Image (spheres, rainbow, N blue to C red):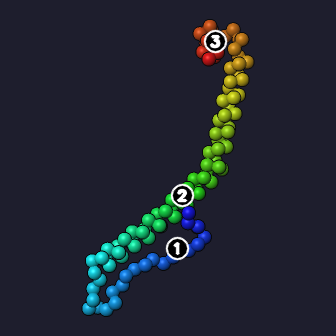
Amino acid sequence: MLSMTKPMPTSLEIRQTTASTPLSRQQKQFNQLIKKIEQQKHLLLEWQQAVQEYNQILAKEIIPLQDELQEQKTALIYLFDAAYPNKLFKKTDKQKLSH
């Protein structure tokens, strides 16, 4: 895994040595592939940052909401349990509550 604090190393690239000698097809292809690798490295870093942000939001906002939801569900179950003997509930209502 790449460290977020280390700077990215500079990329390799084959450069034309003189104006009269153009790069070969393989050299051009190499340069294109190096550029693609650099783009993918950049994309990977963005994804790693997004995952970190997601985990922070999850820990700060989502998990507490899930805990609150579970507490509310538990309170609702206790409320139904306390209301079960109430005569306002019909037999069919009590059957539903007993499941």
Identify residue type, mark 3. Answer: Lys
Q: Residue at x 31, y 92 (%)?
A: 18
**Residue 12, percent from left and from top:** 43, 78
Viewport quadrant of the C terminus: top right
Viewport quadrant of the N terminus: bottom right
How far apart, in angstroms, are the residues tagged by discs 1 and 3?
66 Å
Question: Which of marks 2 and 3 precedes in the sequence?
Answer: 2
Query: Regarding mark 2 in the picture, which secondary structure is present there?
Result: helix
Of badges 3 and 2, the one in the foreground is: 2
Q: Residue at x 62, y 8 (%)?
A: 90
How far apart, in angstroms, are the residues tagged by discs 2 and 1?
18 Å
Q: Which mark is residue 94?
A: 3
**Residue 86, percent from left and from top:** 71, 11
Of badges 2 and 1, the one in the foreground is: 1
- The residue labelled by disc 2 is 50
Sort mark 1 into few (<14), some (14-19) or many (20+) by Cα contacts within 10 Å. few
How far apart, in angstroms, are the residues tagged by discs 3 and 2?
48 Å
Quadrant in the rendering for residue 50 = bottom right
Viewer-nearest residue: 40 or 64 = 40
Identify residue type, mark 1. Answer: Met
Q: Residue at x 42, y 69 (%)?
A: 37
- The residue labelled by disc 1 is 8
Q: Which mark is residue 16?
A: none
Sort mark 3 into few (<14), some (14-19) or many (20+) by Cα contacts within 10 Å. some
Identify residue type, mark 2. Answer: Ala
